[in-house]
Image (tube, rainbow, N blue to C red):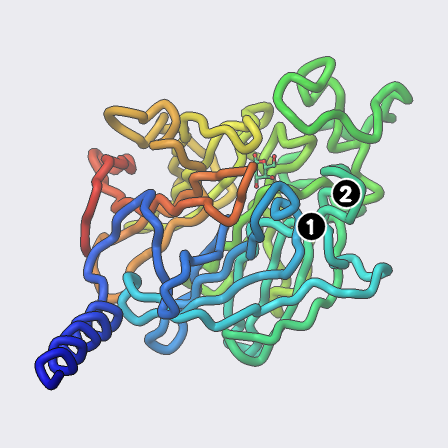
Amino acid sequence: MIQRIFSLLIVLFCALTLHAQKSKQFTPGEIWPDNKGKHINAHGGGILFYKGVYYWYGEHKIAGKIGNSAQVGVSCYSSKDLYNWKDESIALKVDEDPNSDITKGCTLERPKVIYNAKTQKFVMWFHLELKGKGYYAARSGVAVSDKPTGPFTFLKSFRPNAGYWPVNVQPYHKKPVSPDVKDSYCGGKGCLPAPVDSVNLLGRDFKGGQMARDMNLFVDEDGTAYHIYSSEENSTLHISKLTDDYLSYSGEYFRVFVGRYMEGATLFKRAGKYYIIASDCTGWAPNAARSAVADEIFGEWKELGNPAVGNESETTFRSQSTFVLQIQGKKDSYIFMGDRWTPDNPIDGRYIWLPIKFENDAPKLYWQDKWSL
Ligand code: GAL
């Protein structure tokens, strides 16, 4: 009997130590358990570093196709080492009120959070599609919180830069827009009847605001924040400077990669240069990533090609970019974060995190089954 109790105790002890064992490596594409042993649920995510802690925000998905719409809200996890993540619960909840822009069942994608040192607020931006309206609303949503883990309060959703022309507007954008230019096309590649500038979507959306879908935030060394998003029916990226409080657009923005249909855009800085890693526009299906470099944030941007190298590089290792994380206190250390989407059961989506190598100042991604910093 005593022997049995003893062996039971040993089994229990082993189980507990195994559970408490900390992970010391990344295993891209595998289940990634949080502190409660559950697969991390923060898709299309991004990371904020604040006072020695990393906070990972992302779309909280539920099982089944319905999980592609927002049924819960935006998740938050915290970590000090980037391998082990604590579930901090839901940072921004969808609203039960059917009249709210972020009512349960809306589409709330690619949330990102930045910290404003002047106002001491945490500011969240996300791509919002109104419930039941497909992908036609193409709005930006903004929420704020006093704490990184939330709760965030939803402030507003709107279309960018209504009534403002971009810095690099062309004279033909300001001419009257033909009445056959529709309010919305299918949003995918190949939907527009002609090249984007001949259709003049910029002019079409001047009054009501430009479209904003896949998006990211970037804070420069001087504290200026920028919003980068797929606009003009996804055909063209806009980079918009935000106001000092990070809550609105300043009205100063630039069109980049016209007609290149870039999605999942990430923006980061290395050795004084700006970089973008983005994807092509093929819905949930993965495609070959793109990369680009510029000396100034508004350009000239020079494309550097697909950063992925080797097997499965044509699908970016079956993933789509969502964020590039610069590691604090480690020179030249950047992580590419991508999503391996599973739209039939989105809660099972996997995370593809890979180190970025720079070869001749161009970012490169090599597959690794396991790796550590
Ligand atoms: C992808 C986009 C995702 C989501 C999806 C919907 O291209 O990156 O964030 O919007 O399309 O089909």
Examine the rendering and report whether any part of residue 296 can be seen.
no
Rendered view: 246 above or below 294: below
Which amino acid does the dot numbered 1 rest on?
Answer: Leu
Rendered view: 288 above or below 354: above
Examine the rendering and report whether any part of residue 348 can be seen.
yes
Kindly give the residue lying farthest to the left in the view shown: 3
Q: CA distance from mark 2 to mark 1?
A: 7 Å
Q: Are marks 2 and 1 in contact (CB under 8 Å)?
A: yes
Tell me the residue at 34%/69% (across/down). 79
Kindly give the residue lying farthest to the right in the view shown: 179
**Picture quadrant of residue 357:** top left
Q: Give the position of the N terminus as an image quadrant.
A: bottom left
Rendered view: 89 above or below 142: below
Q: Which mark is residue 137?
A: 2
**Picture quadrant of residue 72:** bottom right
Kindly give the residue lying farthest to the top in the view shown: 194
Which amino acid does the dot numbered 2 rest on?
Answer: Ala
Mark 1 highlights which residue?
128
